[in-house]
Amino acid sequence: MITLSDVSVAIDGTPIVADISATIPAGRLTAIIGPNGSGKSTLLKALCRDLPFSGTITLNGHDLRTLSPVAAACHRAVLPQSSTLPFPFTVREVVAMGLTAGRPGPNAQRVARLPEEALERVDLSGFGGRYYGALSGGEQQRVQLARVLCQVWTPVLDGLPRFLFLDEPVSSLDIRHQLLIMDEARRFADTGGGVLVVLHDLNLAAMYADQILALRAGRLVAAGAPIAVLTDETIQSLFEAPLRVGALPPAGAPFVLPQSTLARSTQTFRVA
Amino acid sequence: MTSLSTSALPALAHRAEGDRSHLGRAVVLGLVGVLVLAMVVSLTTGASGASALALARHWLGLTQAAPDTLLRDQVVILNIRLPRMLLGMLIGAGLAVSGLLMQGLFRNPLADPGLVGVSSGSALGAIIIIVLGGGLLAPVIAPLGIFALPLAAFGGGVATTALLYRVATRAGQTAIATMLLAGIAIGAMAGAFSGVLVYIASDNQLRDLTFWGMGSLAGATWVKILAAGPIIAISLIVAAFLGKGLNALTLGEATAAHLGVPVQRFKILAILAVAGATGASVAVSGGIGFVGIVVPHLLRLVIGPDHRYLMPATALLGASFLLMADALSRVIVAPAELPIGIVTAAFGGPFFLWLLLQRRRNLAW
Amino acid sequence: MMALRTLLAASALALLCGLAPASADPLPDASRLVSIGGSLTEIIFALDAEDRLVARDQTATFPPEAMALPDVGYMRALAPEGVLSVNPTALLVLEGSGPPEALAVLESAGVAYRTVPERYSAEGVIEKVRAVGDALGLEAEADALVAQLTADFDTLAARTAAIATPKRVLFVLSNQGGQIQASGTGTAADGIIALSGAVNAITQYQGYRPLSEEAITAAAPDAIVMMDRGGDHAASDEDLLAHPAIALTPAGRDRAIYRLDGAYLLGFGPRTAAAATELADLIYGTQ
């Protein structure tokens, strides 16, 4: 479990995130939503220790500030928005970098084959010998996910849950791979790990998240289950945009429809 | 380029696609052989007819050498070629590994200690000792003895890098672009200060500067090895443990930290290793160019950029390359010698251009 | 090769045991000699001891016969093994040769070396000749050469003493891209200017340094002396005269630019009296 109490982050003296208290439990998928500049990525960076913060964050009971880099790497893995490499690494070599901290799981013997298994999970079997730099942006993003999965291969280690931090993991992917990546994240949570994902797509958040944290101007304005957070008033004030939430027939899951005031009313709405 | 040849260890059944570690291991092993060969060449080539083999046979009691040739051959082998070979290996490995560390650290295949001012800082340290060591700084330097020059060069390298850090690091994060630009500025400053010192140097000091700056291994002695060897050796040992972290660092500093690398401490270690290897090399051999760029580049083409194998391979090939260049430099115009820097540049320059052309052809790598 | 070396060493040994040292302090065995420093090579030739020379350094370019000897490299960047490869028994090195480590290694290989001091004056030349004669055990020959050189220098001194108003001379080492490198005091150029009865126009610093345009104008040389180095370094007279600061000086106005061979002009060897006389002729006109 990750707890945040009164977490604030300032960059060059400008407060970006202020007084956030929340819990990111294991076995759940938590999504952070909010408009551009609301502090989503900044909050994630504080959780990754990329930025100094005030307040307290604990990771499985440990104070995040005093955790050693290797111990932190054993507790959580981070998928960045994008990664370029200056040298001609093969896909397999990149994925194997996930094993740097050396604790993918309790069983050391399987380690040699982990990169291949991870590539299979992200639908990239047979890509191991390709050069990372020669792949498309979407393929690179999936390679990075495979690397991250290698790092925390078993969602629970030594009785403690591990966490995946995903920073806009699907923004460069087609719809099939968006679902594939989110399914992986979902599976990680379902098998005992914790997932924290920054999402722009409210419908993916609605579909996959157990818990949504809504940020606006650096403050937590709503937190809870999708059905509780994704209401007309909340998201209209959150994004300052005419949005309407509906419910999908089978399970009653919420979905969000953007409704431009400039859109021609006669235009037939077509689902892509 | 995409076909990764599999030749070395056919016994292993499972080899994943894109896993080049077998190739890395095979090349490292092969390079050990190359280095042994280069060492033999280095011990047996030279302008004089001294024969290492004959000397060895004499020591083993197999043959009896004439006493006068014995003395001379003994001096040639033990006091000229052997220290020269050891110094060549240390400097070659040190410069090549420094280049590799810099390239990994700055995530730039063209980085070099020369680029961020470490070499200029080291040279400044050495020049300060040569020009001011006799007078102004004598009380400080005298107790250091033979270690004064390499330590000063090391100190110069560390000081320039520390200054770089103050300029380019904020909140524990180093901005590479700022660091490169600051490195150029600091290198220029160190160069200017060196220029002032050279300008005020007396004739004798100028002569010492000339001896020092020749970029040659001709002055190799056991004393120099004793002075510079430990610093280079320690730097190489430190570098040997940095391979895995450098791999992670190619993904960026933040990602390396997420992967469990203690990034700030890691960078300080890497920079100390660079300053040590570069500084001590500069102190004993002046400047020898191109080793730090050409050797890692060539190996990256052969075994890929995995630093766990690249690091030992670079050290071995760097040592071999310098030994070969040195052997060439002493036979090409015998009995005179070419400065080795000319040989490394003459081979390194065209090779480097060829590499760039190759890269243009394989844009995707 | 080995047998020959043994033979040579044996004969050297015999020589050593057979002959008592003639006088002051000759090298133990100067039968196979490497001379480091062009002026020393010239002196050895002048003492008719060239048959003992087995190698020379890069700066030895006179007499032409010297060029036929193997070249062991630049005097300040000697490679010990290269020197050993010509099987020398002794080394005669001009002050400033090195590196010192190389000389130490050579000594440890049983090659004795003698350092000959370098001073840029007539006395310095005499001192060099005596030192070489001493080292080679050729005192009588050295005495004869000294007598001849002393006479030459006396003639020169008599001539330069008659000069009422010495001219100011600027020695230009190089003119690269309009940057003039000129000689201050304490150099061979300064020495030869003094010997030729002129005064160095630059006395503010020691050694060869880049000179600013204003310093050139302020120095106001009456003549400019350069080394004749063929095409490569040569700042042609036009280039030099086109230099704005040089053009303003009396030397520039009178187009008084003189060139002499570098080793001849700056070597401080047996030819120095002749070189200084020739320079005086160029500056003041023949008498």
Image (cartoon, grey):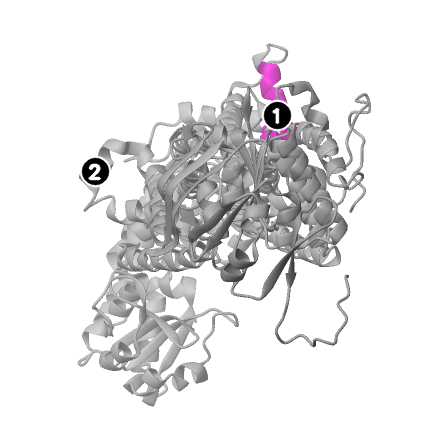
Nearest to the observer: residue C107 or residue C208: C208
Mark 2, residues whose alpha carbon is within 10 Å: few (<14), some, or many (≥20)? few
**Discs 2 and 1 share one subunit:** no
- In magenta, the rendered stretch is B35-58
State the image coordinates of residue C226 (x, y, percent, origin top left): 39, 72
Q: In the displayed structure, does residue B181 sit left or right of residue B201?
A: right
Main SS, magenta residues: helix
The residue depicted at 52 percent of the width and 38 percent of the height is B258
Nearest to the observer: residue C84 or residue B322: B322
Residue A129 visible in the shown view: yes
Identify which amino acid the numbered label 1 is placed on: Ala
Instruction: Look at the picture and state if A215 lies above or below A104.
Output: below
Q: Secondary structure at mark 1?
A: helix
Q: In the displayed structure, does residue B38 sit left or right of residue C9?
A: right
Q: Which residue has dot 2 on it?
A: B140
Res B64 quadrant in image: top right
